[in-house]
Image (cartoon, grey):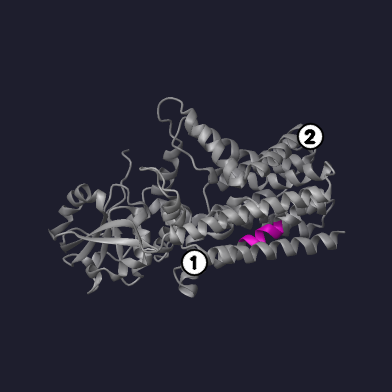
């Protein structure tokens, strides 16, 4: 039965791998991906928004495959490996049927299919690192009497996994804290506190994340300040933000997957004396609870912040459904319906992002953004007269637009941001030689007066704006103003704002 389940798991992974490749081909890079690919042109020890691993991968993927959808290939392959590790983890803990359910459910959940499984974002490398660490530790905790050499190797592998996670996202610290809590809470595992293994693993993980600390020390701890500010109390409770965060998680996972995930976690909580379930709960709960509750008083959260926790709920869901002895035909119907919904949503999103047909068929209300515009290609910017002949540099007014501009124009034209919120653009290099040179300021038409006033002091003279429209399938979508600017008077990039001490 195990061999049959392994073959089925391989088929599931292969099928979703092909689906992700097709989805990646049909959908242009979004705002975050464009920003990442552009920022990653400058190879650095770390970056403002996140630790560096996904930027490092993006840097070399872009060199090998180009700065387009093909740069997603390493992330898609990495998630396929992550799915196999989760399957093996679940199979070892709860058996092959539970593992197959967990694997399929993970892949069919929209967030894990698209963002974590396909896109150039930190979630994929984060989950891979956490999955490696969890699998290694599960072998230590729940396989009886492994030999001494195997114990050392597994602790070392766990440290490497946690190091990869720490190089991906700061939230990996919550998972590490959950693992420490498990060793303290599980009576059979406290013996590891007297063993060198946990301390070696921690030392390996910390050593691997040293680039993050070095970069932050060199840049006034800007990244830690940027991420830490999101949890600072903002005055009064914000229940709408909390409810929005909960609703977002349900949507990211699909309601009929979220419900058994929650049921599996509730069942595990009731049976937490079972150390296998306690182990997964200690990995799942910290990110879910911290990032769901924080929006009550802090900044608006994003549902994807909780997803590393939900990742470890899938084995609990598989075990819960397996123990219910649900008929195979019912599981197949559920799988077909889930796959159909995912395929439909993916197809509609890809078609809408490239043609805009849905918003023309049913126009959205004024002031409501079309999220698929994030994946719209800005290559039409190359044809603007302002870029012929090629300027020495381009300045954008928004960090989010700068990534789109950079990918559209290619790496030969340096892009900078003049804004009170430049994000990672404040740390790109190459601007020292541009003093006195001429460039182009790219601004959204509606923001032109304010942004022009803010940028004017950086140049000797500012020319007349020229309008340029980006179209999607022949329809006007993004209105830009291209402003010639002459004689740069201050060095780029603009320094990142430092919090007062």
Q: Is residue 84 magenta?
A: yes
Name the residue tied to disc 2: 271
Q: Main secondary structure of the magenta part?
A: helix
452 left or right, relative to 417: left
- Helix, strand or loop at disc 2? loop
In this picture, is 114 found above or below 67?
A: above
Q: Tell me what residue is drawn at x 40 percent, y 66 percent.
A: 41
Q: Tell me what residue is drawn at x 60 percent, y 53 percent.
A: 112
In this picture, is 193 found above or below 41?
A: above
Number of other residues with Cα within 10 Å of mark 2, as a class: few under 14, some 14 to 19, many 20 or more:
few
Name the residue tied to disc 1: 69
Q: Position of residue 210 (x, y in %)?
A: 50, 55
Q: Position of residue 435 (x, y in %)?
A: 19, 64
Q: Can you tell which of label 1 and label 2 is closer to the viewer? A: 1
Q: Position of residue 289 (x, y in %)?
A: 59, 35
Evaluate whether residue 126 shows in this view: no
Lower position in the chain sequence, tag 1 or tag 2: 1
Q: Which residues are magenta?
A: 79-85
429 left or right, relative to 330: left
Residue 276, quarter of the rendered image:
top right
CA–CA distance between discs 1 and 2? Answer: 44 Å
In this picture, is 237 found above or below 450?
A: above
Residue 425, quarter of the rendered image:
bottom left
């Amino acid at each position: 039965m195990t061999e049959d389940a392994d073959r089925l798991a391989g088929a599931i992974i292969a099928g979703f791998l092909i689906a992700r490749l097709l989805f990646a081909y049909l959908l242009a890079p979004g705002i975050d991906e464009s920003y990442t690919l552009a920022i990653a042109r400058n190879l650095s020890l770390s970056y403002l928004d996140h630790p560096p691993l996904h930027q490092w991968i993006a840097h070399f993927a872009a060199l090998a495959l180009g700065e387009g959808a093909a740069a997603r290939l390493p992330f898609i392959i990495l998630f396929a490996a992550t799915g196999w590790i989760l399957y093996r983890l679940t199979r070892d803990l709860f058996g092959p049927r539970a593992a197959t359910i967990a694997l399929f459910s993970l892949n069919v959940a929209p967030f894990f299919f698209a963002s974590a499984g396909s896109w150039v974002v930190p979630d994929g490398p984060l989950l891979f690192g956490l999955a490696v660490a969890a699998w290694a530790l599960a072998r230590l905790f729940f396989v009886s009497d492994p030999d001494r050499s195997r114990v050392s190797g597994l602790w070392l592998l766990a440290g490497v996994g946690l190091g990869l996670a720490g190089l991906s996202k700061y939230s990996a610290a919550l998972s590490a804290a959950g693992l420490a809590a498990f060793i303290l809470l599980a009576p059979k595992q406290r013996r590891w506190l007297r063993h060198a293994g946990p301390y070696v693993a921690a030392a390996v993980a910390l050593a691997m994340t040293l680039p993050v600390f070095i970069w932050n020390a060199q840049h006034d701890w800007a990244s830690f300040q940027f991420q830490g500010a999101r949890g600072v109390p903002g005055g009064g409770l914000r229940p709408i933000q909390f409810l929005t965060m909960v609703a977002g998680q349900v949507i990211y996972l699909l309601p009929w997957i979220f419900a058994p995930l929650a049921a599996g976690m509730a069942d595990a909580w009731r049976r937490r004396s079972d150390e296998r379930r306690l182990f997964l709960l200690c990995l799942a709960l910290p990110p879910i609870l911290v990032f769901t509750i924080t929006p009550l008083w802090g900044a608006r959260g994003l549902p994807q912040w909780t997803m590393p926790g939900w990742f470890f709920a899938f084995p609990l869901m598989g075990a819960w459904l397996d123990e219910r002895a649900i008929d195979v035909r019912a599981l197949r119907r559920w799988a077909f319906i889930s796959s159909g919904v995912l395929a439909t949503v993916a197809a509609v999103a890809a078609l809408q992002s490239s043609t805009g047909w849905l918003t023309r068929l049913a126009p959205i209300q004024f002031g409501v953004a079309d999220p698929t515009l994030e994946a719209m290609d800005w290559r039409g910017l190359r044809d603007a007269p302002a870029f012929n002949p090629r300027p020495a540099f381009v300045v954008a007014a928004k960090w989010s637009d700068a990534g789109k501009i950079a990918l559209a124009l290619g790496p030969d034209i340096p892009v900078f941001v003049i804004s009170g919120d430049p994000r990672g653009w404040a740390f790109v290099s190459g601007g020292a030689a541009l003093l006195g040179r001429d460039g182009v300021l790219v601004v959204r038409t509606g923001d032109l007066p304010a942004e022009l006033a803010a940028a004017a002091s950086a140049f000797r003279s500012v020319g007349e704006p020229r309008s340029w429209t980006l179209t999607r399938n022949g329809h006007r979508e993004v209105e830009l103003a291209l402003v010639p600017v002459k004689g740069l008077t201050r060095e780029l990039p603009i320094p990142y704002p430092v919090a007062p001490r």
